Image: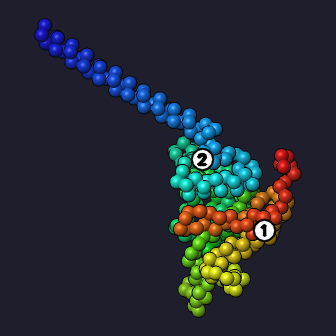
Amino acid sequence: MKLNFILLTLLVMVSAHHVSAQKQKDKKRVATEGKAATADSAKWKKENYIINRDSAYANPRVGLQKLISGNRRFTEGKSIRPRQDSSIIKKLSTGQEPFAVVMSCSDSRVPNEMIFDQGFGDLFIIRTAGQVSAEASFGSIEFAVLKLKSKLIVVLGHTECGAVAAAVEKPQNPPGHIVALINAIKPAVAKSANMPGDPVANAVRQNVIEQVNQLRELEPVLSRKYTASEILIVGAVYDIHTGKVEFLPETISNLPSPKKTAGKH
Ligand SMILES: [Zn+2]
C-alpha cells in the first residue's frame, strides 16, 4: 500500500513536470510564431526597407532600390540575411532569377551578398581583381542577361583597391598575368591623373565609370539592350571603412527612359 502511494506520487510528479515542460514548449512556439508574423508585417517591412523581390527582378530601377535598401540595412546593423536557409536551396535547385548582375573586385573585404544584405539566387556575380573585364566576364554578363533575364548590371569598385593602386604605381615589370589587370586599369589612371585629391581614390571612381561605359557600348548584346532601355548598367564604389556603397551620380543620371511597356511610368 505504502509502495503504491509512493509510485503514485512519483507518477503525478513526473506527469506534472511533463505538462509544465509542454506548456513551456507551447509558449516558446507561440512566441516564435508571433515573431514570424511581425516579420511579415507592413510596419516591419517599412522599418527594414524591404523591397519586393519579384518587382526587383522585373524592373531594374526597383532592383537598384533593393540594393540601396539592403546596403542601408547592412550599414545600420539591421541586416536580415534573407534567403539563406536550407529551404531556399531546395527551391532554387530548379532554376535561378538573379535580380542583379554585379561585376565586382575579388577583394575579400567586399563580400557582395553581405554588403547588400541579399541571399541565395539574388546576385549573379563576376569577380576579378579591379573588376576588370575580359571575354569571359563579358560572356558571363551576357549569359545572365539573355538566359536568366537579369536586367540590372552593377559595376562595383571599392576604396583602396590593390589592383587600382598597382596601376597607379605603374610598375616596370609586373609579374605573371598581373600585367593584364594593370593594362586594363591604365586608361582610368591616365584620365584621372590630373584630378585634385587622392590619386588611387580618383582612379577607383574613374575605373568604375570607364567600365560602365565599356559595358554600355559592348556589342552585340548589352549595347542594344541598354539603348532599348531593357537593362540598366550603373556603377558604384564600396567604402571599406564604412561598409557604405555609393552609386556614382555620373552613372545613374541621364539613364535611358524606362521602357514604355512597363506601364506605370
Ligand atoms: Zn580591389
Q: Residue furthest right?
A: 260
Q: Tell me if mark 2 has few (under 14), some (14-19) or many (20+) residues whose alpha carbon lies within 10 angstroms of its own.
A: some
Residue shown at 39%/29% (left/top)? Answer: 25
Q: Residue furthest left?
A: 2
Disc on the earlier residue, 2 or 1: 2
Across and down, in percent, residue 65 comes to 69, 54
Which disc, if any, is residue 216?
A: 1
On screen, 156 above or below 87?
below
Residue shown at 60%/38% (left/top)? Answer: 40
Q: Quadrant of residue 193?
A: bottom right
Q: Quadrant of residue 186?
A: bottom right
Which disc, if any, is residue 48?
A: 2
On screen, 183 above or below 120?
below
Residue shown at 72%/51% (left/top)? Answer: 62
Q: Is label 2 in a helix, a strand or a loop? A: loop
Q: Tell me if mark 1 has few (under 14), some (14-19) or many (20+) residues whose alpha carbon lies within 10 angstroms of its own.
A: many
**From the Cβ of disc 1, is ligand 1 less than 8 Å away?**
no
Across and down, in percent, residue 89 comes to 56, 47
Say which quadrant the N terminus sits in. Answer: top left
Left or right side of 260 for 231: left
Which disc, if any, is residue 153?
A: none
Q: Which of these two is toward me, 188 or 224?
A: 188
On screen, 241 above or below 122?
below
Residue shown at 68%/45% (left/top)? Answer: 52
Left or right side of 21 for 142: right
